[in-house]
Image (cartoon, grey):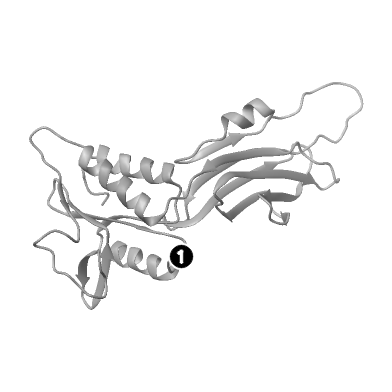
Amino acid sequence: MNRRDFQKAILTGGLITIFGCGGGGGGGKKKNKAPVIESIVRGFKNTNGEYDGKIHYNIIAKDRDGEIKEVCVKWNNEDLKCYDDPIVEFSGKIDEGVNTLKATAYDNMGKASSTLLDGFNAHIPSYTEAYNHIREMIEADIRTGEPIRLKDASSSDEQKYADFPGKVVIALDDLLVPSDFKIIKNDGSIALINYSSAEENLEKHLSYRRALQDYRIDNLYFYATPLDEVHNAMGELISKYYETDF
């Protein structure tokens, strides 16, 4: 990948796949061909579909005339990590600003592939910035004949809980789950939306999200997620006209 291609890869949102390029052929004496990084797939959700403040990569390497010995990954300023497998699942903490991944494969003869790069520019918002952005997106979506039914902690018909100030709360048996917003969708079910900053407790955040999944309640629970990805995910929910995912 040249510098121009790398610049094209500086973007956020969704799953992004970067493809490597194989080497050329040729006659004469047979030579050991270099391995290739065949693809790099990037996503902001982990394997459980959760926003956990990390970037998640799937990296695939191939060697046409031998075996892949290892794949080495360099993420931002972290130490180089090498894996003795042609398929690598890699996760890294997202930093504010430009984030860069470099991946190189080595075959069983010690020959290296070209280094494949992937990068994106991340702005990780504060809780207040994310809250305001989400609210503005919901309120700006005006549909003829179908007003948006949005509830938050200021809604008069929502029960208030001292342990969760500024939140709407639903009870799942003995568990209380707080959220920033509750949307009443077209089919009468609800969707809960919440943004947590990196200063909050990740495990507590994920426990709420997993409880909602267990009860099959649609939700978007963001944790220290770049603003572009928050925007993209909210746009997808809005474009579904608040239909359920289940």
Q: Residues within 10 Å of mark 1 (few under 14, many from 20)?
A: few
| Viewport quadrant of the N terminus | top right
- Mark 1 sits on what residue? 199
- Tell me if I can see residue 37 in this picture: no
Residue 198 position (above or below residue 42): below
Residue in the picture at 21% in, 75% down = 173
Relative depth, front residue between 83 and 222: 222
Residue 163, by quadrant, is bottom left
44 in relation to 155, above or below? above
Q: Amino acid at mark 1?
A: Glu
Q: Position of residue 51 (x, y in %)?
A: 43, 55
x, y percent for residue 146: 10, 39
Residue 246 placement, left or right of 129: left
- Count of all numbered marks drawn on residues in the image: 1
Q: Position of residue 126 (x, y in %)?
A: 41, 54
Q: Is residue 194 visible?
A: yes
Outermost residue toward the top? 27
Find numbered disc 1 in the image and state the secondary structure of the residue it sits on: loop
